[in-house]
Amino acid sequence: MFMSPTNWDLASLICKLFVYFGAASLVGGSLFLWLYNDGSRKTSVTILRYMALGTFFGFQGSLFNFLIQVGMVVDNGLGGMFDFGMATIFLDTQLGDTTFFRLGGFVLSFTISCFYLYRIGALDKTPPSAFYYFLNSINIVAFLLIAFSFRFSGHISVLSFIAKLSIAIHFFAFAAWIGSLYPLYRLTYLENINIMQISMKKFGDNAIALVLLLIVAGILMLLELFHSISEVFTTPYGQALLVKLVLVFFIFGIAGINKLKLTPGLVNKRGVLSLRNSIRIEILVAILIVCVTSYFSTIVGPSEHQMG
């Protein structure tokens, strides 16, 4: 099942992890400020820092992934990453387009996050929800740039329009859910349990729509990537995908427990602690899902869609 990756492959995988983390913090942080924020300055500052850190890593992952691909072709050690002639050639390829859109998206989100951190520091009172409208508008543009970059990358670039749209929807739902987990975890440290319960319930209700998006988009992607069920079990890509599906069903189960049992149980400190620990486990499973996703999209891929 598992292929033996080269050092270049591992470096590229780490870069992809950074890109996923950046996209998740961008979408999850924006949604939290819009829908689930308790309104306090402290919480807002924490989430803006989370978004700024995530998009900073996303930028680094995008930039170094480009340099790693250059170094892989030049094959002259680490110095090959900075071969100007080869980098110039790569800028005119799909890799150059992918890198351009991702860097643009992450720069936009990082800049607006830092700007809002400065603005909050200059305020003498807690900002209203309308305060974040401009930030969220900019982050929508930033995410669209990042999502659009996937149409140029790897085996995705040769798929049909429906498949590319499904991947974009799947990517958004994934980023919205995974990226909201850390902000929700921080929310469990609020002293006001009533506000906490309202926000958690709202997220649980909205998560149903995210799950449906993930399932529908995932099915459409599978129909495009595999020509028969047997390929899921007999190819490295299919087997890696099965591992991801197991983890996805596991995180669905945790989310169901959070929504149906632990959120209604937010009536005392014991209930808060139980939910906090559950979200910690959910974050751990989410990290495993991202690692598996990065593995099978970087190291392996559907044989008929691999880009030589």
Image (cartoon, helix red, strand yellow):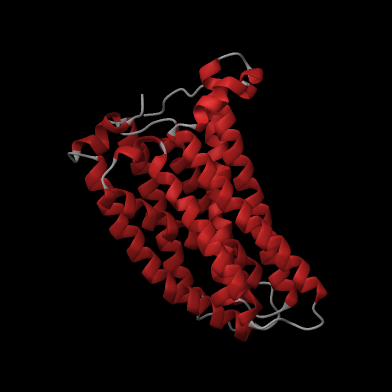
Q: Position of residue 132 (x, y in %)?
A: 62, 74
Q: Residue at x 68, y 58 (%)?
A: 111
> Is residue 279 visible to the viewer in this orientation of the structure?
no
In what quadrant of the picture does the N terminus appear?
top left
Q: Residue at x 61, y 18 (%)?
A: 80
In what quadrant of the picture does the C terminus appear?
top left
Q: Residue at x 61, y 34 (%)?
A: 64
Question: Is 111 above or below relative to 238?
Answer: below
Residue 214 or 114: which is nearer the viewer?
114
Q: Tell me where residue 276 sits by quadrant.
A: bottom right
Most distant residue in the top direction: 76
Q: Position of residue 201 (x, y in %)?
A: 49, 79
Most distant residue in the left direction: 228
In-image side of 90 versus 256 (left or right): right
Residue 218 or 94: which is nearer the viewer?
94
Residue 2 or 39: which is nearer the viewer?
39
Q: Where is residue 268 in the image (x, y as percent from the top left)?
A: 63, 82
Most distant residue in the bottom direction: 194
Question: Is 116 above or below relative to 129?
Answer: above
In-image side of 136 versus 255 (left or right): right
Q: Tell me where residue 160 sits by quadrant.
A: top left
Question: Is 253 above or below relative to 230?
Answer: below
> Is residue 194 visible to the viewer in this orientation of the structure?
yes
Numbered label tally: 0
In-image side of 49 versus 19 (left or right): right
Question: Is 16 above or below relative to 300?
Answer: below
